[in-house]
Amino acid sequence: MFNERLARRALIGVALLGLAGGLAAAFLDRGGLAHWIWAAGAIPVAASLAVSIVRDLRAGRAGVDSVAFISMTAALALGEPLAAAVVAVMYAGGSVLEDFAVGRAERELKSLVDRAPRIAHRRVADAVADAPIDEVAIGDRLLVRAGEIVPVDGLIMSESVSIDESALTGEPMPVLRHAGEAARSGTVNAGETFEMEASATAGASAYAAIIGLVTAAQTAKAPFIRVADRFALLLLPAALALAGAAWGFSHDPIRALAVLVAATPCPLILAAPVAFIAGTSRAARRGILIKGGGPLEALARAHTVMFDKTGTLTVGGARLVSIEAAPGANADEALRLAASLEQASHHVVAAAIVAAALEKGLALQIPTSVRETMGSGLQGVIEGRTICAGSYSLVSGGGRPGDWAARALRRASWRSALSVFIAVDGQVVAALLLADELRPEAPRAIAALRAGGVRRIVMLTGDRRDAAETIGAALDLDAVLVVADWDADVALRAAGNGAKRDA
């Protein structure tokens, strides 16, 4: 593939040099030399195109390229190399533009592939040995260390683990999984080291399936180009018939050549890649990845749109949404102490707390004597005071929550937020509520889609139903589908009978 791309770039260079060099020679009244230069620029492209056509014919395919090949060869045979050079530049230019579009998709795919784990820590008797991920078999016991990517699908053997599943579900908050529950490849261990039993090989695991789907989506040709290739079976004989008629009526083969050159679908060869590159590039600048030309074309016909929630309609990360302070406690001071302590942690929630404090302009201190309980919280000393941040049971020592703390827990439940309680010298002083937030531009985007003719807008999510329905109500969506109870019939009923007909 890489060598083919280099060859196509070399061909466009040769074609452009031939066209420009011939024009320069013609300008200097060196007509004979100009003809030779134009021919030299067109012949390599024609030869390459001939090889491509033969390869397609052997595979049972025919495309619009055949008309371009006949035009070039006819122009060269009839002593009109300038026409051949122009067609060569058009064809080679379209191929290079398509390469740029595919290259963008492959760069995105490379980042996905690079993230895939290569090594698994396999338990053999009482020892742990590193093994290539392809050698992991079903039933192998694996060790997943803190911060590592789960290598294959499996069942958790440890009592409880904290897993960041955002790479698969988009859900920004780590989730707590227990012994016997599934751990999927591609997720990240956000807690302490745990053991798991492989239930699938690397090639059959969830992350490998995602890579396969993205690969197929990004390397597929757009339907518009496939339709054009199918019509080439009609275009070629029609063009030849018209060219023959022009020759027969005028008795001038140049007239036939003019028909062939005019019939060469250079605008089609160039327009499709240019349109797709322009569309995908503009979308990429706005943070939208379009996986190929097919989805881009489908937007023009869409009447039903399904959105993921986390990271699409919402910001897609933990954000401080509220500070619930105990009576007499200062909310900003509690946040300052919590953020100072959380500087010692790499947890996604810690980063959100530190960012919120810095945004408020609070002056943070460096904690000492920090002790972290992965997935539960941490403790340290700041300005001579012992600060503890984490779950209520951790910071309170298992005591019963007071009225204000109970209210904070209820509010966290209503908002599907994560609560981080702060204790100073053993006294619980505040609770930080962190949750995902609706994107500010989401309501405008939904309104623009409805104005553009989209009749049904549905949200799909793996989040809790109450949190999902809150977002759905805020955006006035037509339906909210939670993955836990999703099936095809539910999706079709939510999309409505109109969506069935459109599909």
Image (spheres, rainbow, N blue to C red):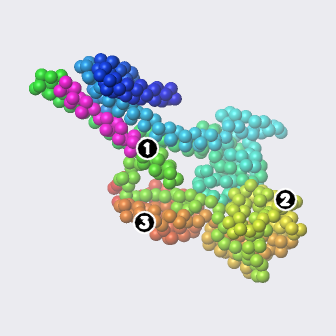
**Residue 50's x, y, as percent?**
35, 22
- Residue nearest the observer in this picture, 29 or 82: 29
Distance Cα–Cα, label 2 vs label 1: 52 Å
- Residue nearest the observer in this picture, 160 or 389: 389
Identify the amino acid type marked 2: Arg
On the question of residue 407 being in view, the answer is yes
Point out the tag, 1 or 3, that comes first from the N-terminus. Answer: 1
Q: Mark 2, residues whose alpha carbon is within 10 Å: few (<14), some, or many (≥20)?
A: some
- Horizontally, residue 168 falls left or right of residue 125, namely left
**Residue at which label 2 appears:** 371
- Chain part drawn in magenta: 254-275
Q: Mark 1, residues whose alpha carbon is within 10 Å: few (<14), some, or many (≥20)?
A: many
Image depth: mark 1 or mark 3 in front: 1
**Residue at which label 1 appears:** 277
Residue 260 belongs to the span the image colors magenta: yes
Q: Mark 3, residues whose alpha carbon is within 10 Å: few (<14), some, or many (≥20)?
A: few
Image depth: mark 2 or mark 1 in front: 1
Label ID, residue 180: none
**Residue most extreme to the front:** 28
Identify the amino acid type marked 1: Ile
**Residue at which label 3 appears:** 447
- Horizontally, residue 165 falls left or right of residue 254, namely right
- Horizontally, residue 46 falls left or right of residue 289, namely left
Identify the amino acid type marked 3: Ala
Quarter of the image for residue 277 reads top left
**Residue 420's x, y, as percent?**
73, 67
Image position of 436 with respect to 77: above or below: below
User: Secondary structure beneath disc 2?
Assistant: strand
Image position of 223 with respect to 464: above or below: above
Quarter of the image for residue 200 reads top right
